[in-house]
Image: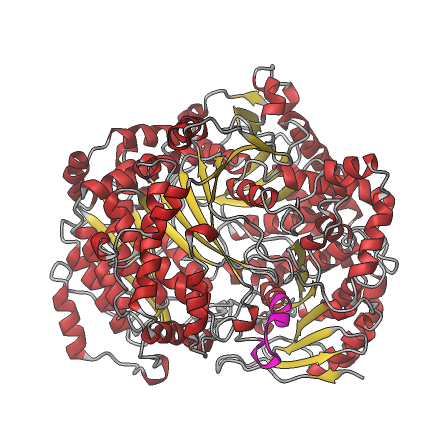
Amino acid sequence: MAVMTAEPIKSEQDHKLYKRLKLDNGLDVLLIHDPEMEASSSADGDARMATDADADDHDDAGSSLQGDSEEDNESMAGHEDDRQHVKKAAAAMAVGVGSFSDPEDVPGMSHYLEHMLFMGSERFPDENDYDSYLQHHGGAANAYTEMEHTNYYFDCKPAALHGALDRFSQFFVAPLCKADALEREVNAVDNEFSGVQQDDGSRLAQLRCHTAKEGHTYRKFTWGNRRSLIELPASRGVDVRSALVQYYKSNYSAERMVLVVLGGEPLDVLEQWVKALFLAVPSGRGPRPVFDHLGRPYTGGRLHVVPAVKQGHSLTLTFQLPSLFQAYRAKPEDYVSHLLGHEGRGSLLSALKAQGWASAISAGVAESGYERNSAVFVFEVTVTLTEAGLHQSPGLGLAVAPIVFSYIEMLRNAGLQRWIFDELAAVAEQRFRFAEDEEASEYVSRLAASLPLYAPEHALNGSYLHEEWRPELVTEVLECMTPLNCRLDLQSCAFEALRKEQKLLFASDVTVSTEPWFDLPYMALPLPTDILRAWEHAPSASSLGLALPQRNHFIPTDFSLRAPTVESGKDARAKQAAEAILTAVPDLSAKADNEHEPGSGSGALQPLEDPPSLIADAPGLQIWHKLDRAFKRPIAVAYLCITPRSAYDSARTAALTHLGLKLLQDAVCETAYLADVAGLQYDAWPEGMAGIELKVNGFSHKLPLLLEQLVHALVGLKVDAGSFTRNKEVLLQKYQNANMHPDRHASYLRLIALKQRMWRLEEVLSELQALTPQSVQEALPGLLQDTHITALIQGNFTAQDAFEMASSARKALSNGILLASERSADRVVVLPTGTLLHRAPVKNSEETNSVAELYCQAGPSSVALRARLDLFEQLFSEPFYDTLRTKEQLGYSVHCSARLTHGILGFAFVVISGGHGPVHLQKRIDAFLEGVAGKLGSIDEAEFEGHRAALIAAKLQKDHALGDEADRNWEQISNRRYNFLAREEEVEELQRLTLKDVQQTYETYLKPTSREARRLAVHVVGKEHAEELSAAAEPCLGTLKPEITDFRAMEHYPAILGQMPPIAQD
């Protein structure tokens, strides 16, 4: 008999129903009923159960076009009037064992086992059955291995939940772990490891594991690779399959597991399903292992110096705290991290910036199992160093450490402040109270991982709670933050130069050691006693300008909703006052309540939700607005696109714009940090020919204040010499580090080839290097000369609010107007028929991975073409992955999807591999494409109909949050296409599509031998296959284009722009 536990506390916005129970085998279960999710009747469910068990599905639910936010969803009925948004069902299982429990003779065992459970079970022996079933029913699956748990999760259409649970349950009942699959899947693990060997974060994490105390569970290699999983065990006489099966039987026990199921069925139905499917999970191994007896993993007072792959330098001070899971109601570590990571006036970062030694800081206990576990909480303060900060005496970045300890000492001496805790508690309560829905799979995965950490009633709000002010715990945290309990890690691209610098500090040469798994050189340096003593008596806080933060005036207090009380008419006096703000455009009109009336007539499409309304269109300003009535939360999103006449007209302008925005970020840092703490975020970025995009989102109460301050800071920006030096250095590093990942490099080269105007990174970098404070100050006014502003204000604001916010920005940007018709538009190259080939070496000379990206251009976007390409992706993305990744083991990352580049549609196939060069990868992509003709011929009507329904469901996916909808609307506005019915139109087109239509699309655009195919192959060549760069290109690969700029001389498509709707009327 299942045992019930307390019902969890939920927010007032959460209409889901929850039920927590423990099965007879000890399995901890949380069931969630979402009333907004369409659920099948019990009779349908019974029929479905029988059908699912016999299903033989092989295809994948396609993802949508790049840049869209449609997601998989419930399938719709055949009639247009039945269209509706539907959510996804999902489930997750967190198994209470992870990498800390790996056996010594098989490093990486937990991660390896996670992979193997996907490879078939006794009940469903086909290796691809689980993935294929989910993909065919609009879903997907994934998993990750943590230090103390392993998390498996999936989502799917609600009607397919039982069938998915049936397959999922067998992971934990009777997996096969077949010997032949072991060999193939170890390649996948090895490829995954090869993909992170040049990742600075992964390298530093492994160094910390390697240098932990002998015998401590931190001293692990958790990734696993061929050497640790095959070669090393074989040398020790270990049968890996037997060890893997034994590890599974010893650790995968029901009482160590937490299952979360989210569906549309009533809770009692979900309970019946779970009992029927999961009571068979074996039990009896006892509670999950804990490691609270092991103590601290590191010896303090030591500095480790390690090379960075990317340009830049960072110093991390690591403090070892006792495990604080039991103190989740008080969260003392949050109090300290809030203060050490603060960026306001008097903060540690402000002091370091004033010295010219740092450009950024982060502080706290991260959420991963490395930082939070039953043995220890690891509190890290990471300082991004400038060149001056790196070399400032005594060198090795150590000059920043005494300032850190000065701040910590100030916190001790100033006394613990209840008002600071109360601010944190208020903000956390507001975030929980108005929390928006998460993606279904993310929600269940997060809950499954966190449920063991909290009391049953706090299952949902445990991570938000700040209900106990316990200053003694804060004091305990601060007492742990001493030089002797501090491990330091310096990661720098100047490793070789630092070897010489350390000689001056330590008066001797230090042996360079090597971490064996990543082959990573490092220096381990015990810090001199005199330095540690000096840190214990660091300079006074007042001498450094350090102080406690000011009270946060951005914390919202008004949570009223505008939608219920808004009137349909406009207040004439408010309109007159608002229009007076904008003297340059006096004839603006607005619509107060944004009630958009869709077009009438027998053939008119009914929108899934009301689109935004154009409430003002005048010289230099367009304002779009939508008042939220769906999400019913006091939040909003404001977008501004500021397009100057000179936008992106040269590489120098691109460099100036980007540096100017970095200077803006620095200028508003102290203000923006207070806003961020209070639930208001902003971002500002260069957007090519569109100019500058600015986004502010969060609680609506203080959003206009932040937006106003940002715009005025942009207009009044002054170049401070110290800020210029720091930010130019940061930006130079950013450009130097771009394209370090081979797959991103390949995409960048494709876009450089296709876009009419896209300055190469090298061009912008050269211009950036030449900039001086004086030249930037002189150029800044020109960057905002003759501007056009496009604004979207969506959420908890009336049209009048939106009008005033955007008009105020227009008034501030008073240095001339650019008419809407004068804005430039992006254009795209028309690829010639056949295949063009461009190849380039990897940017990081030590990178072993190569990439082949094959792009097939289709032409200007239309509803029909987009629907066909999306349906092709739906049909073949999973077979492409299964063939090239699972069966041929070409690499860990294999994917294909439609592409939309400034209104031009195409389709890209990408394979990343550490074991094969791009030549072989492209040949295998083409071999797959040649075989598509036969696969299309074998698809029957029922299978095709299932895939079409899954894709339609994806187009009708319900938005989880206001930001999802606003982002989609902004995409239509900023790209000037204005088709807010794009999803609805494609759904209508999909309903008409036949398999013959897809075959014709394949034959025309995607088949390698098609005379109409226009293809671009991009090869990014890793160091293991460098010979391919100089070899003659085989004819089957295409015509070699050595210079990427050669593409710009080709014919271009005209700009693809839509028809802007008229201004909304009252």
Quarter residue 738 falls in: top left
Whether residue 1015 can be seen here: no
Whole-percent x and y of residue 328?
A: 52, 72
Q: Quadrant of residue 585?
A: bottom left
Q: What quarter of the picture does the N terminus occupy?
A: bottom right
- The x, y position of residue 786, in whole percent, is 18, 46
In the displayed structure, 144 sits above or below 82; it is above
Q: Position of residue 951 (x, y in %)?
A: 63, 58
Vertical relation: 264 (above or below) 977? below
Q: Is residue 1039 left or right of residue 434?
A: right
| Residue shown at 65% from the left, 48% from the top | 872
Chief SS of the magenta region: helix
Give the residues in magenta: 448-459
Let me know if residue 409 is in the magenta part: no
Between 283 and 327, the residue placed more toward the observer is 327
Residue 457 among those drawn in magenta: yes
The residue under the point 38% across, 48% down is 1057
Question: Which quadrant would residue 588 be assigned to in this image?
Answer: bottom left
Residue 763 as seen in the image, left or right of residue 134 = left
